[in-house]
Amino acid sequence: MQIAADTEVGVTTEGNTVSWSDISAAVRDVREYLGLKLTTGGCATRFLYELAGHKCRMPQSFGGKPMLVHVHAVMDQIGKMERAQNSQAVKTKAASRFNGKTLKGLWHQHWFQASFMPHNLAGEMEKHGKSLIIKRHGRDGWESRTIDREMVGLLAHASMFDAGNSAPGAGCRLTGEWIVFAKAGGRNIYLTLGGHEEPDEAILECCLPAAREFGELASAEPFSRYQ
């Protein structure tokens, strides 16, 4: 079924309408940029459209929590995973397998954008028992605050005196949400964006259609369980 170019498919974070032609143009841009990042890997259609939606400033729900993703942060992380030339990304935790039964066989790689920094700082500060920000605004109540002059000061103080006073050698590994991918045929197949708060079943549902695009997934878990 062909979709008319002027069909409304969503709204931006600012409340502006996004049309099918906007999404189609964004998909072309994303595909072109990914072409510079992918060396051997493949990208599922769903993943392309997720990134296109974010490029059009349409937030995505991660376990009921709407979020606007910085598209280039995700694509730069993919470039790093693909060892593409001149690819740089913020250093995060190494890619790892999912442990649960539902997503067995799939992998996830953290990616990071600037808006994740308050959450990361909070985690480090809370582990070490000191946090001016948490005392001032509570454990979760401050995360949606605008980064104003007061918050900049609190973050600077926290990074220097709270997280910075952790045990020597403990380090602070940045975390974010996930790029969910499969390893098959000697390469990575990028499937969907995922989040810590999402049920495994919801992530799996997003991944399974890729088996129709990439034949090498048919014999790999978890796809082989649904043939």
Image (cartoon, grey):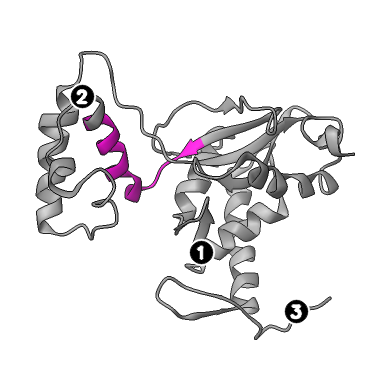
Q: Position of residue 90 (x, y in %)?
A: 39, 37
Between 106 and 78, the residue placed more toward the observer is 106
Between 191 and 73, the residue placed more toward the observer is 191
Residue 180 lies in magenta, yes or no? Answer: no
Which SS class for mark 2? loop
> Which residue corresponds to the image point at 10% horizontal and 57% vertical from the top-left?
149
Mark 2 or mark 1, earlier in chain: 1
Residue 3 has which mark? 3
- Where are the magenta residues, as a range? 110-125
In the image, what residue type sits under mark 3?
Answer: Ile
Seen in the picture, residue 172 relative to 199 is either above or below; the reply is above
Q: Name the residue under label 1.
A: 55
Q: Are marks 3 and 2 in contact (CB under 8 Å)?
A: no
What is the C-alpha distance between the residues marked 3 and 2?
53 Å
Q: Can residue 71 be seen in this view?
A: yes
What is the C-alpha distance between the residues marked 3 and 1?
20 Å
Q: Quadrant of residue 169?
A: top left
Q: Can residue 191 be seen in this view?
A: no
Residue 128 has which mark? 2
User: On the picture, is 3 further left or further right than 192?
Assistant: right
